Image: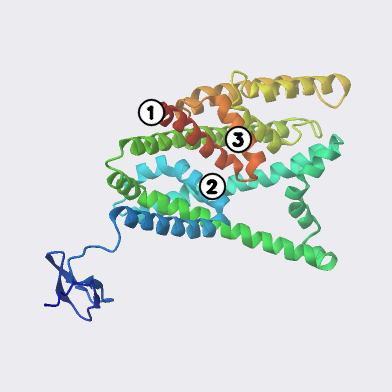
Amino acid sequence: MGVVIYPIPVLIRLPEPVCAPVSGRAEAVNSHGGFPRLVPITGMGSLLTGRQERAAWVVVGLTIAGFVGFVLYAFFGALVVGLFLYYAMRPVHRRLEDRFDHPDVAATATVLLVGVPVLLVVGYAAVVGVRQFDQFLAAANLQQLRVAVEPYVSSLTAADGGVFGLLRNNVSRVTELTTALVNWALRLFVIVTVAFYLLRDDRKIAGWFRATFADHETAVRFVEHVDDHLTTIYTGNLVTIGATGLIAITVFYGLDLLAPAGTGVAFPVLLGLLVGVATIVPAVGIKAVYFPYTAFLVWRSQTTATTPLWFPVTFFLVAAVALDWFPDFIVRSYLSKGELNMGLVLLTYVLGAVAFGWYGVFFGPVVLVFFTTFAREILPELT
């Protein structure tokens, strides 16, 4: 009686480049040096089915994504601000690309000429605005609100006594301030780096995404619409807020120089920031800011002898032309566009800051864009 030998799949480690028959075909193994590969020498096929292999790779991908997300979570706010800076600078970068042949040169010039000044102006306005808001709350005797903003002003007010005063009186405060400065320096580095590489490689990323998901038109269309809406909400609305706020701050400081001593515009930076935010208030706009303040100036001119009546009139006329008409017809018509509801955008800025903290102003619009795009593009196909 003969002995029947059944083929048993064996994995052999091939130490050097050879060709091994795999399922009826020859395959080059380790053709570039590197680690040897394990190749089945029988025709039994793969150890995993196609579905099992796909599930295994999904697990590997989710594991990698989890580790990457864990690393990036510490600087999530900086990543979001870097995304905003990219969209804010992209129109300028598109023009510089036509002048410079090298992508690194165009991206570097955009970051240095636009990105860094924007961050400095926004940072300075935020610091001064927080201080003036705290001073306003103190003058209005609103102690409960001062307690709410105390974490934001503590590090700023700590430096009022000077460096030597800090060293002499409170060493722990110096340590906290140094730690905060290091953290913000790291955040600034992440912001600039993210914006730079997005500017330089955005076309490559877009091409990779379209090639990878070429068979999924819905996914490509969804991401393209998200990009369009983020361009509107970042390049349009936020830049409009910043430009209008900067114009308002400049105008208020100029009016403060014209007014008699002690009767000018109180808290010009804070008032200018409010004007910038009010540009996206539906229907009313910045009238919600300069109308009440004009009424306050008129009341002060009638109740005190220090404020002449011509100053409220001048303030109203200048604000109506330089802050209301000019931004509305020039700045907003050039920058703001799209299908997003301005009421939702305004609500997103407020709720985003409350829910996520300092970076919520930039992350809230991202949440809004994904929500509205999904509701318009994907949800109808699922019903």
Q: Give the CA separation, mark 2 to mark 1.
A: 33 Å
Task: Give the side of residue 72 with respect to residue 273, left or right.
Answer: left
Residue 336 percent across, percent down from the top left: 48, 28
Task: Give the side of residue 95 with respect to residue 150, left or right.
Answer: left
The relative height of residue 150 versus residue 364 in the rendered view (above or below) is below
- Quadrant including the C terminus: top left
Q: Residue at label 2?
A: 81
Q: Residue at label 3?
A: 349
Q: Earlier in the sequence, mark 3 or mark 1?
A: 3
The relative height of residue 193 versus residue 94 in the rendered view (above or below) is below
- Identify the mark at residue 381; answer none if there is no mark: 1
Residue at image coords 70%, 33%: 271
Instruction: Give the crowd class for mark 1: few <14, some 14-19, many >=20 residues within 10 Å.
Output: few
Q: Give the CA separation, mark 2 to mark 3.
A: 14 Å
Residue 16 percent across, percent down from the top left: 20, 80
Task: Indicate the secondary structure of the residue bearing disc 1.
Answer: helix
Q: Earlier in the sequence, mark 2 or mark 1?
A: 2
77 vs 276, nearest the viewer: 77
